[in-house]
Amino acid sequence: MKNRLTRVWNSLSGRVWNPPLRSFLYIVLVGSLFITLPAHALEELVKINAEQEQHIGIRTFKPEAVASIPLARAPARVTLPPQNEYIVSASQAGLISQVDVAMGMKIAKGQVLAQIQSPSLLGLQRGVLDSVTSFNLAQSKLDRDTTLLQEGIIARMRYQETQSDYERYATAAKEAEQVLAAAGISDIDIQSLKRTRKLNSLMNVRSPIEGVVLERMATAGQRVDVLAPLFRIGKLDELWLEIDMPQERMNEVRMGDHVRIENTGGTARIAQIGQSVNPGSQSALVRGVIEGKSQSIRPGQNVNVQISHASTDRGFRFPLAALVNQEGKSYVFVRVPGGFAARQVAVASTEGRSVVIHEGLQDGAQVVVQGVAALKAAWTGIGGDE
């Protein structure tokens, strides 16, 4: 044992220049020559007064309580739910004469995105105007025959024939408007056509929703066919995470597990766990729903995430520098009356320069994060025996 104490003293004396501290460590080490302690004595108190603590430069930290235990890190992609993504297509063939929006712009429902010059549109508009003219004439005849029938001038059979013509023309007018609407003309433009009776081969392409332009395929001067995609629009009120989870960790993932999106401050909850594995990457898809809104999270973004379990254990997070490894076990030094005590802890995971433990600490504990090496040297020097 004397040889071991000599090695500890030589190691510490070369690093500790402060004379009072050297004296303190020397007394501690020499005193251990007269003490024979069992192995479990490593849990005993390391007695240090305020002056010695100041010389060593000990600094403590109050661990942060955590409600979840980190499970694994994995890559992920930010996506839109399928029901929140729309493709705006050209409903008529023609020439794109103008594009009014750019990628990434916020747009309102019904806003004009582009304009298409389409000669075939003129025939559809003429059909609407002809049907409206016929309908108005039929309505006038019906009003006249209604009056004549009430005065007994015409027979009911003639009134019924006039009413039948009115209903036929009304149906034809609605059909012509629906054909024009199916061609991509908005109700606002149809009502304007009926009011002004002016034909126009210029068709406005409008947004079906309020959202953001995610992709723009249309360019001015481009000729497009019917149903050619022009814009991709998305509603950003809900975003998903598609997480590539290693297949060996799949059994540990649970519905409702917490997901932290690194470098964004965003969080999510696991909402779906895939049942198949990608043969190439040997990973399975785990889908999470992002909570709240964040300006730093956007569709199509590649991110790294940390998945955590909700836990009934009392977990704590503190700097990794506080952790001490001794004979395959993990310890931290905790401030107690009269000095510091080594407490064995159960490590759940490490996150960069932090560590999360789920056993070994109580609320209000103060762990040592600076001066750990000196405390460990004194602790192992007292407790060791050869």
Image (cartoon, grey):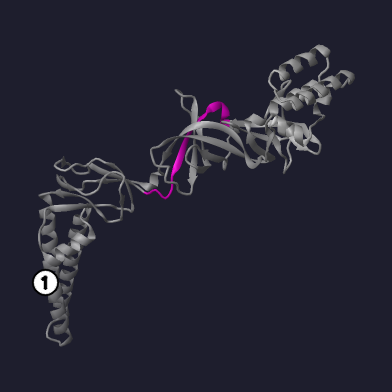
Whether 177 is among the magenta residues is no
Whether 236 is among the magenta residues is yes
49 relative position to 161: left or right: right
185 or 372, which lies in front?
Answer: 372
Q: Position of residue 182 (x, y in %)?
A: 22, 53
Judge whether 76 appears above or below 116 on screen: above
Residue 345 in sight in this render: no
Residue lying at the far front of the rendered structure: 19
| Chain part drawn in magenta | 235-250
Q: Secondary structure at mark 1?
A: helix
Residue 113 in sight in this render: yes
Residue lying at the far bottom of the rendered structure: 151
- The quarter in which the C terminus is drawn is top right
Q: Position of residue 174 (x, y in %)?
A: 20, 62
Judge whether 197 appears above or below 1 on screen: below
Instruction: Give the residue at mark 1.
Output: 137
Judge whether 241 appears above or below 180 on screen: above
Q: Residue at x 44, y 23 (%)?
A: 280
- The quarter in which the N terminus is drawn is top right
Crowd band around label 1 with a 10 angstrom C-alpha radius: few (<14), some (14–19), many (20+): some
4 or 172, which lies in front?
Answer: 4
Q: Position of residue 18 (x, y in %)?
A: 71, 25
36 or 213, which lies in front?
Answer: 36
User: Type of residue at label 1?
Assistant: Leu
Displayed quadrant of residue 366: top right
Marker count (numbered): 1
94 relative position to 321: left or right: left
Q: Residue at x 40, y 37 (%)?
A: 301
238 relative position to 65: left or right: left
Displayed quadrant of residue 178: bottom left
Q: Position of residue 165 (x, y in %)?
A: 15, 69
